[in-house]
Image: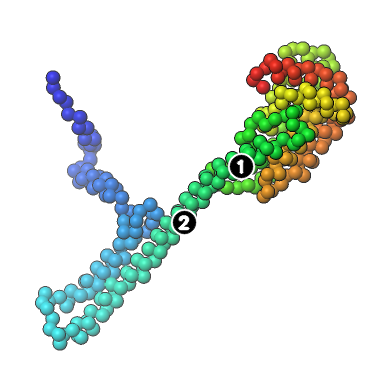
């Protein structure tokens, strides 16, 4: 059996190229492989200083001119001690020309060091942001596990998606940038959209109850029940029925009013973790019109029993809540 060599074949060459062009192309490829910055006026922070043309060209230029200026004095002999003083006077100007490369090379070195320090500072900030992100996020998870749900609503709702809650409280914090600020206009628009969607499901459900159309697989109530965890990161607790039964005896709130109250106070509770910027007043302002509307809606009282019935069904039958 013949053994075939595994050495790769050389890349095909363009027959239209001259030998000089092909040779120059190979020279360029070899120069690029050296990892030397051949550009005369640029600095790469990835390369050391001595691999920059901008560092060498002042030396080559001024020292080269200085050597040319000394050509008349070349004798290829050792001068006698009596000629030293004259020789120093004659070489004074060429030495001055050669020394002009020093301030330029020093300035280039400073620029290179400054660029490397800037890159090192950027990497340090990114590494700190990366490490602090997980430490801060874990601390937040512990907080919402211990004090995220206000005590008056424990047993009614529970944390479902802690990641969504974290992004709600710290929307601009990330692995690459530590930023605990909140864009209030964006947050307001998002919160308003979520509340409008939740309230829309409630209105449709109430209308269906009034018209006797609610038996069609509880789709609208399913949509309402799933909007809460998907939009806010909470969900109904398994023990909500007992909680609501005891709570309804002490208050006049309907099931849907209680949902909005629980979400509101839980959002206020988790946002208290953000000591940099608070949006409590914004949450209060956005929830108030919906709470007022729910309290004044008499049709909700008739839909309340149906809502409880379907909620129990969802918690026992629908495992995808």
Q: Quick check: 252 left or right of 151?
A: right
Q: Can residue 39 be seen in this view?
A: no
Q: Is mark 2 on a helix, strand or loop?
A: helix
State the residue in front, 38 or 285: 285
Mark 1 = which residue?
A: 139
Percent of width and height locating residue 29: 27, 45
Percent of width and height locating residue 246: 83, 26
Q: Quick check: 250 left or right of 260?
A: right
Determine the residue positioned at 82% across, 23% down: 245
Determine the residue positioned at 61% across, 35% down: 163
Determine the residue positioned at 18% across, 74% down: 71
Mark 2 = which residue?
A: 118
Q: In which quarter of the image is residue 68?
A: bottom left
State the residue in front, 211 or 218: 218
Q: Is mark 1 on a helix, strand or loop?
A: helix
Q: Quadrant of the C terminus?
A: top right
State the residue in front, 187 or 169: 169
Q: In which quarter of the image is the N terminus?
A: top left
Q: Is residue 241 above or below residue 89?
A: above
Q: In which quarter of the image is residue 311?
A: top right
In the current view of this chain or complex, which residue is farthest to the left?
77
Percent of width and height locating residue 191: 72, 36
Mark 1 and mark 2 residues within 8 Å of each other at the beta carbon: no
> How many C-alpha atoms fall within 10 Å of the one at disc 2: few (<14), some, or many (≥20)?
few
Q: In this view, does 96 lie above or below 25?
A: below
Q: In this view, does 144 lie above or below 96?
A: above
> How many C-alpha atoms fall within 10 Å of the one at disc 1: few (<14), some, or many (≥20)?
few
Q: In the rendered structure, which disc, 1 or 2, sits on the residue that comes first in sequence?
A: 2
Find the distance from the CA under tag 1 to the CA under tag 2: 31 Å
Percent of width and height locating residue 259: 77, 29
């Amino acid at each position: 059996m013949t053994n075939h060599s595994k050495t790769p074949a050389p890349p095909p060459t363009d027959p239209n190229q001259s030998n000089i062009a092909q040779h120059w192309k190979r020279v360029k490829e070899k120069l690029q492989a050296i990892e030397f910055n051949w550009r005369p006026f640029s600095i790469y922070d990835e390369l050391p200083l001595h691999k920059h043309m901008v560092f060498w060209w002042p030396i080559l230029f001024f020292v080269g001119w200085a050597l040319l200026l000394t050509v008349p004095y070349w004798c290829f002999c050792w001068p006698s001690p009596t000629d030293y003083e004259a020789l120093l006077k004659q070489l004074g100007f060429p030495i001055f020309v050669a020394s002009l490369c020093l301030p330029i090379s020093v300035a280039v070195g400073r620029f290179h060091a400054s660029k490397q320090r800037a890159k090192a500072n950027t990497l340090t900030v990114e590494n700190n942001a990366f490490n602090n992100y997980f430490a801060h996020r874990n601390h937040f998870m512990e907080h919402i596990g211990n004090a995220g749900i206000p005590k008056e609503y424990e047993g009614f709702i529970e944390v479902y998606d802690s990641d969504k809650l974290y992004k709600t409280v710290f929307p601009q914090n990330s692995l690459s940038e530590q930023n605990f600020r909140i864009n209030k206009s964006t947050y307001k628009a998002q919160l308003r959209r979520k509340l409008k969607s939740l309230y829309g499901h409630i209105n449709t459900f109430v209308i269906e109850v009034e018209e006797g159309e609610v038996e069609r697989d509880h789709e609208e109530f399913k949509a309402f029940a799933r909007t809460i965890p998907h939009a806010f990161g909470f969900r109904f607790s398994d023990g909500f029925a007992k909680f609501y039964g005891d709570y309804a005896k002490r208050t006049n709130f309907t099931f849907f009013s209680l949902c909005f109250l629980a979400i509101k106070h839980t959002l206020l509770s988790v946002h208290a973790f953000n000591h940099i910027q608070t949006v409590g007043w914004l949450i209060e302002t956005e929830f108030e019109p919906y709470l007022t509307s729910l309290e004044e809606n008499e049709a909700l009282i008739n839909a309340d029993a149906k809502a409880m019935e379907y909620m129990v069904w969802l918690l026992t039958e629908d495992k995808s809540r």
